[in-house]
Amino acid sequence: FGLKLGTSVNKETALGIRLVRDLLPDDVVVENVSYVDPDQEEPAATYTLNILLGTVRDNYTGLMWQSCSLGQSWNSSLGCVGESLQLDWQEALQYAEGARTGMDAGYSDWRLPNIKEIASIQNLLQNSTYYPMIDSVFVTPLDSAAPGTAGTMPGKYWSSTSDVSIEEIALAADFSSG
């Protein structure tokens, strides 16, 4: 169906980072705002945004995403604030490993997503000629009049998936169109 799962990128290139974790059976998930795609035939909340913690639950994959890109911080009134950072692939893996030892949004098991996981947050219903678009729950500030910024800036984001045939290459999701 034409979905390009990843873009091959040299591991030394600096790209954006978005962390993910698996929802566990004993996780308490506070539901604040549910996002439904208006083009779906059977409306069901695809994502649930936890406004207090700044996390997004994918109700289909069972994954929990940080609302903000690496370098930004979550503000429950404004959304994501600050500038997103870009790291090379090895630095991204190291940062994700460090996130496993700290507590971010109350969890210590964040990781860099594999290419299939990060591809799952693409909005395939939005028409983009060249690149997939990330779902709007990850880019819309809470209040468009406030100084908060989008959680995912247009561009490429690392996955944990490396190229099996070329050691210097890893796969990234390209959300250049929005």
Image: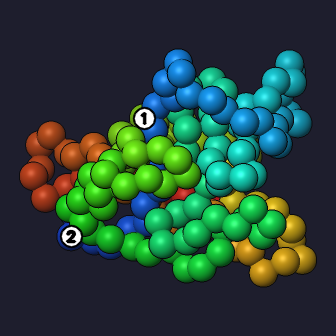
Q: CA distance from mark 1 to mark 2?
A: 22 Å
**Mark 2 — residue?**
12
Task: Locate residue 172, reporting x and y percent.
Answer: 38, 53
**Mark 1 — residue?**
116
**Residue for point 46% across, 31% down:** 22
Q: Residues within 10 Å of mark 1 (few under 14, many from 20)?
A: some
For residue 81, which quarter of the picture?
bottom right
Horizontal side, residue 113 vs residue 79: left or right: left
Task: Locate residue 14, reporting x and y percent.
Answer: 32, 73
Horizontal side, residue 20 vs residue 164: left or right: right
**Badge 1 or badge 2: first in the primary sequence:** 2
**Residue for point 79% across, 29% down:** 45
Q: Is residue 9 above or below residue 13?
A: above
Q: Nearer the viewer, residue 88 or 129?
A: 88
**Residue for point 32% across, 71% down:** 87
Give amino acid for label 1.
Answer: Lys
Task: Locate residue 27, reporting x and y percent.
Answer: 56, 28
